Image: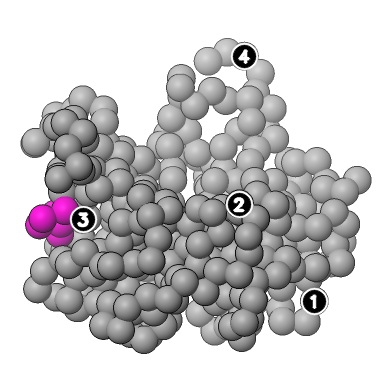
Amino acid sequence: MNEMISPVHHFLDGCVLEHDFIYMAAHLDDLEYEKYAHTLMIGFDAYSIGYGEVGNGWWGHDLNMDIVSLCVKKATNNSDRMICALSKEGEIELYSSKAGKGVTEKIPDAGLRLSEYKGGAVGYVTHIREIGGRLYVCGMSGQVYAREASGKWVHHDEGLFRPSAYDDDSDDDPVNLFNCIDGNDARDLYVVGDDGVAFHHDGYMWSKLDVPTTEHLQWVRCYGRDEVYLCGYNGVLLKGNARDGFKDVSTVEDNYTWWCLCKFQDKVYLSAVEGLFAWDGQKIAKVVTGLQPEVETWRVDADPAGKSLWSFGVKDLVRFDGQHWQRFHHPDNPRIGE
């Protein structure tokens, strides 16, 4: 690759480590996805940047992977806090900002590339999450993987997994196209996907949930065993749990797609192409930040202490501390609104 590539990029995903410390995956605008597997991993320390300064607080490194999802693995007595980056092929970088380096693992049969891994390649993976101290990944062939303490990745998808290569379009046994996974612990896991598919694992087996929608479900977030949210296409927002069932609390008639959600303080924030929205327990309304232009969003996440909400747009990066909204500009990208 000898051609000049612009450093201008767009964000793919983001996660919040602390209220002023975030981590993002980005792709260069000029780089063709089909030709090159490459992602910019970008860290940002808002505390050190100050106000109005440019260039400080940013750091990062390159990965020769197509990253699709990020999460934070909490520190333990035996390991530092790790930032986990998942590629669609099932490669995972476990990065320590403290050590300034990472290690790479591979889920043996995840992805579509022909490889030396046992069992071949069965389908892309889509999402990674730490649940109850353990890492889980879901994918487009009904895969759910769990990482053992030894670092080995194993299937955790009995009854769900069906490689898409074997799909015969049978309505009786369709392929589960999973988009997101979350839970409270190993005995309370949820995974959601296309066509209103949602499953729950109680520590013994997976059970299909009877949810009041057939729309594609893009995201699931758990805030305790009783408070679980699902969202997706056509403005659908569901609240409930596996024990009591789910209720449709959608209140918008427009054909919005909620790509992500996050609870912050007393509201559930929803990201859509049309902007940032919030559900206050009664209705869903568009968020007015006062920023010019208004927020463009794709992912939303909050810090563990509940001090700030971050919105990650394709180009836009915004923080809300409960009182004020603030936009940050990456030094390699054009400044939004200018």
Q: Which residue is under mark 4? A: 3
Q: Secondary structure at mark 4?
A: loop
Residue bearing mark 1:
324
Q: Nearer the viewer, mark 2 or mark 3?
A: 2
Range of magenta residues: 152-160
Q: Residues within 10 Å of mark 1 (few under 14, many from 20)?
A: few
Above or below for 112 versus 76? above
Look at the numbered disc 2 and give the secondary structure of its residue: loop
Q: Please, is residue 202 above or below residue 155 in the view? A: below
Image location (x, y in percent) of residue 332: 73, 41
Q: Which mark is residue 73?
A: none
N-term-proximal mark, 4 vs 3: 4
Q: Are marks 1 and 3 in contact (CB under 8 Å)?
A: no
State left or right for residue 108 relative to residue 47. Answer: left
Q: Amino acid at mark 1?
A: His
Near mark 3 (Cα within 10 A), the count class, few <14, some 14-19 or many ≥20, is many
How far apart are labels 2 and 3 at the CA level? 33 Å
